[in-house]
Image (spheres, rainbow, N blue to C red):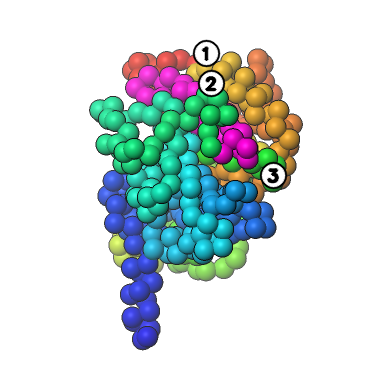
Amino acid sequence: MTKTAAISAQTADRRWPYWPIVPIYPYGQRRTLRRELVPDWIWVFEQVQGIFYVVVPIRMTVVRLEAGGLLVYAPVAPTGECLGLLRELCDRFGDVRYIILPTISGIEHKVFIGPFARRFPAATVFVAPGQWSFPLNLPLSWLGCPWGRTEILPPERSATPFADEFDYEILGPLSLGLGKFGEVVFYHRRSRTLLATDTILSVPPDPPEVVQLDPYPLLFHAKDGAADPIRDTPSNRQKGWQRICLFALYFRPATLETVDLGPAWQEAKQGSDRTRRAYFGLYPFTWKAGWRDTFATLSHHETLRVAPILQTLILNRDPVTVRHWCDRVARWPFERIIPCHFTAAIAATPHDWRDAFQFLTPNPAQTLPAADLQVLRDIDRRLIDLKVTPPPA
């Protein structure tokens, strides 16, 4: 095979034709990285997603079943590359038997469930209760869930065919006004592993391997101005990653200033790269001295955290319900957590899990700087004033 033919085949293998449904980076091309986290029992399949090169991992977890076959938690885009890596596991341990959609609000997860399920016609799909869509609340089959083999996860896990190997706890649905939030965490007893979607994360100081498969977004955000050239060095990869984390989790931390569009376009004319890939030289950001300290506080030895947006806009709407759910989850003796974003696996205990939700207790200690949360709190007030969402409880 010629080099051109090999590149063409590789491109076809990573093609994701449904990207216009959720038009975010990397659009129609998605690379997949498979990693084994618990030998012979648990694997993760990682891709990336983002907006304006603010890219973070999105992760599917595959667990081997003792009775044979595989359980898939939170599918990612079923590209040819992804399916090829998964079929290697199917050849060893049996076909996919169960597919879990553990969220009712994360469209970046829901968009994959239909295409993924169609690739495994013998698998049963289980979805978190309270599924909804906007602007019309459509039936599950209209949202891509296969007719006749999609079930809603029941409150009693003993009613599921995988009850001998997994426990789970359902959060919500929590009312957010126009929509709802809900998530189901799974506990794999044999490996003492907790599977989570969006409620929990840990921020690593260095970019995850999947993000480095194409380092351009990291290098783009390592720039200090539009005129700076793209330079691929380990320090620039780390610098870009840490800034991406601040963007993704705070939107605009106190150490970031945005440049108005007019001056930004003038600066873009001095850009070292004015191609489409570089947004024609546009770089409307200025980072203040001290941004590394802002990141260090957020990461803090890879502390287990609830994302700031969930703290300020979602989980505080019903803190009592969330705390009770958190306590139920903490009864399991897990030793690691695999979330769908940022780093995995995270060495963590039930005590660490509870600590991450301390922001919901009366008079909690402030663990994140108020100045960095200000933009999120401004959004919160605006949504309340417009009666889009209810105020915090």
238 or 158, nearer to the observer: 158
The local secondary structure at tag 1 comes to loop
Looking at the picture, does residue 94 appear above or below residue 350?
below
Residue 316, which numbered label? Answer: 2
Task: Report the span colored magenta.
Answer: 162-186
Residue found at x 71% / y 28%: 331
Three-letter code, disc 1: Ala
Query: Relative to 115, is 251 on the left or the right?
Result: right
Place of residue 161 in the rendered image (x, y in percent of width and height, measured from the top left) = 53, 37
Determine which residue is flagged by label 3: 190
Residue 219 shows up from this direction: no
Secondary structure under tag 2 reads: helix
Q: Which residue is mark 1?
A: 393
Q: Residue 149's x, y, as percent?
A: 38, 39
Q: What amino acid is labelled 3 in the image?
A: Arg
User: Secondary structure under badge 3?
Assistant: loop
The alpha-carbon separation of the residues under discs 1 and 2 comes to 6 Å
Residue 177 included in the magenta stretch of the image: yes
* CB within 8 Å, label 1 to label 2: yes
Mark before the other along the chain sequence, 2 or 3: 3
Whether residue 230 appears in this view of the structure is yes
Residue 91 locus on image (x, y percent): 52, 63
Q: Give the main secondary structure, helix, strand or loop, of the magenta stretch.
A: strand
Looking at the picture, does residue 358 appear above or below residue 115? above
The answer to which image quadrant residue 177 occupies is top left
As measured in the structure, the alpha-carbon distance from the residue carrying label 2 to the one carrying label 3 is: 33 Å
Query: Amino acid type of disc 2?
Result: Asn
Query: The N terminus lies in which quarter of the figure?
Result: bottom left
